[in-house]
Image: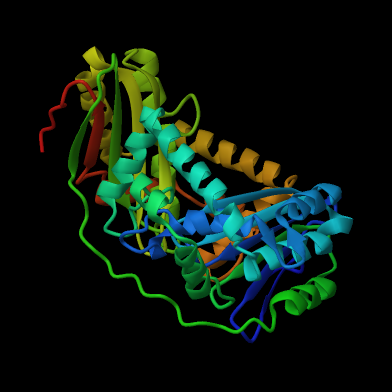
């Protein structure tokens, strides 16, 4: 590690990982708690999200209102995200207030009230979110695509389902928190201006005596169907395509990610240029890389009119198939330029860096400096990238569509 990147392991299994960015006047913290939606019981989809929401409704010495007001007085912007394996509680503030913000979030993670009087309000919010997805066909389709592509329970959406939201009890939430919120496997990522010795001491004072717990087990199940059609009476059709990739920790992660980026990173990317701009087949198209700990995928989405849906699917699959023939030097040069720009922007944001530090530790067990990432990208050769794509072409697709007519596939 560099002088600006440090980590500390506490006896209870909690990891603190941080990068000093002394030129900033801000600081950010990201608590990654190993309590994601993969641990939801089979009949309680969305329980991790429900628990996260309830944890924000008062903790330690703070009532629900006092929690909000305290963070506002500290000038903190907080955010939460329920992922597959972890739940994120994050916040950004001016550097002088970092330790006060950490104290508040530590209470949320460790000592939430989970008050009975807030249960129905949280339930209503969960149900409203689920119903909002029904009004967003593209979001609904991509949730179903992931559910089909990944094996159970890694494909389950974090928002769960309405029957689970209706039937979840306060006892369910308390049991989930007791079983899954734990210091071992938890990562606290910090970035910005701070004093390292004080940071180590503060995190230890809030969380260091928290006793570790056994890690819950997840029994893997089968994948969903590789072909899915959802009827929707509409003039539009949503199309989703997924194919396997390699996870972040894999030696071939960089060329795998670069292949996806050639497809979808920027207005010069292949999907936008060939499917939308040249042929005018769709109003929206793109692809994204998604990594779990031991598996990963690329998920593509296209929104189009019903009468052009079949052609949109066919042409998109053709573009995916062309990746096996490699990319050209200009495409690689544009990709490297975009990565360099993104890294420069990260250097100016403590919030994005805190989250990426924590994610690095989850996936790699260490922190990559921005300089290391830039060196890796600069070192990616056309020969290596094209060799990877030739040996690992997009294939074995999971295809889901939502619209008035079922689409045909050759497989």
Number of numbered discs overlaid on the protein picture: 0
- Please tell me which residue lies in front, 377 or 395: 395
Please give left or right for residue 79 compared with residue 285 in the image. Answer: right
Which residue reaches farthest left?
410
The structure residue drawn at horizontal position 80% and vertical position 78%, both measured from the top left corner, is: 201
Across and down, in percent, residue 323 comes to 30, 38
Which residue reaches farthest bottom?
11
Give the quarter of the figure containing the C terminus. Answer: top left
* Quadrant of the image occupied by residue 336: top right
Across and down, in percent, residue 36 comes to 47, 61
Give the quarter of the figure containing the N terminus. Answer: bottom right
Across and down, in percent, residue 402 comes to 26, 28
Across and down, in percent, residue 401 comes to 24, 31
Colour approach in the figure? rainbow
Please give left or right for residue 410 compared with residue 133 in the image. Answer: left
Relative height, residue 128 to residue 268 (above, below)? below
Please give left or right for residue 32 compared with residue 131 in the image. Answer: right
Is residue 387 visible from the viewing direction of this image?
Answer: no
- Please tell me which residue lies in front, 69 or 208: 69
Is residue 123 visible from the viewing direction of this image?
Answer: yes
Relative height, residue 220 to residue 383 (above, below)? below
Please give left or right for residue 179 compared with residue 98 in the image. Answer: left
Which residue reaches farthest front?
117
The structure residue drawn at horizontal position 55% and vertical position 78%, both measured from the top left corner, is: 184
Relative height, residue 293 to residue 397 (above, below)? below
- Please tell me which residue lies in front, 93 or 213: 213
- Please tell me which residue lies in front, 70 or 404: 70
């Amino acid at each position: 590690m560099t002088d600006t990147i440090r980590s500390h392991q506490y006896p209870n299994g909690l990891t603190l990982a941080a990068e000093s960015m002394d030129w900033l006047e801000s600081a950010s913290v990201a608590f990654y708690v190993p309590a994601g939606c993969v641990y939801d019981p089979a009949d309680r989809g969305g329980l991790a999200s429900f628990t996260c929401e309830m944890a924000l409704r008062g903790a330690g010495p703070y009532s629900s209102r006092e929690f909000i007001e305290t963070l506002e007085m500290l000038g903190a912007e907080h955010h939460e995200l329920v992922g597959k394996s972890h739940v994120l509680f994050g916040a950004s503030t001016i550097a002088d207030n970092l330790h006060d913000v950490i104290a508040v979030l530590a209470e949320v993670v460790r000592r939430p009230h989970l008050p009975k009087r807030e249960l129905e309000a949280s339930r209503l919010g969960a149900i409203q979110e689920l119903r909002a997805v029904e009004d967003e066909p593209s979001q609904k389709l991509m949730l179903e695509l992931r559910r089909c592509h990944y094996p159970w329970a890694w494909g389950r959406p974090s928002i769960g389902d309405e029957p689970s939201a209706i039937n979840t009890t306060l006892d369910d939430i308390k049991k989930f928190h007791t079983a899954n919120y734990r210091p071992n496997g938890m990562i606290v990522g910090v970035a910005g201006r701070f004093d390292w010795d004080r940071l180590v001491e503060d995190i230890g004072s809030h969380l260091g005596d928290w006793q570790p717990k056994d890690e819950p087990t997840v029994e893997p199940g089968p994948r969903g169907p590789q072909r899915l059609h959802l009827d929707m009476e509409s003039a539009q059709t949503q199309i989703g395509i997924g194919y396997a990739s390699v996870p972040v920790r894999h030696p071939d992660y960089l060329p795998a990610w670069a292949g996806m980026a050639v497809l979808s990173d920027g207005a010069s990317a292949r999907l936008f240029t060939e499917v939308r701009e040249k042929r005018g087949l769709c109003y929206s198209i793109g692809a994204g890389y998604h990594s779990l700990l031991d598996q990963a995928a690329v998920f593509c989405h296209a929104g189009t009119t019903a009468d052009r849906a079949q052609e949109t699917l066919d042409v998109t699959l053709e573009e995916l198939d062309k990746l096996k023939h490699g990319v050209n030097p200009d495409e690689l040069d544009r990709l490297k330029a975009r990565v360099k720009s993104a890294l420069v922007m990260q250097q100016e944001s403590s919030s994005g860096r805190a989250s990426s530090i924590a994610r690095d530790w989850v996936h790699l067990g260490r922190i990559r400096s921005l300089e290391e990432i830039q060196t890796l990208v600069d070192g990616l050769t056309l020969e290596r990238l094209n060799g990877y794509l030739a040996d690992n072409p997009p294939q074995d697709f999971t295809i889901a569509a939502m619209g008035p007519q079922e689409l045909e596939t050759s497989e």
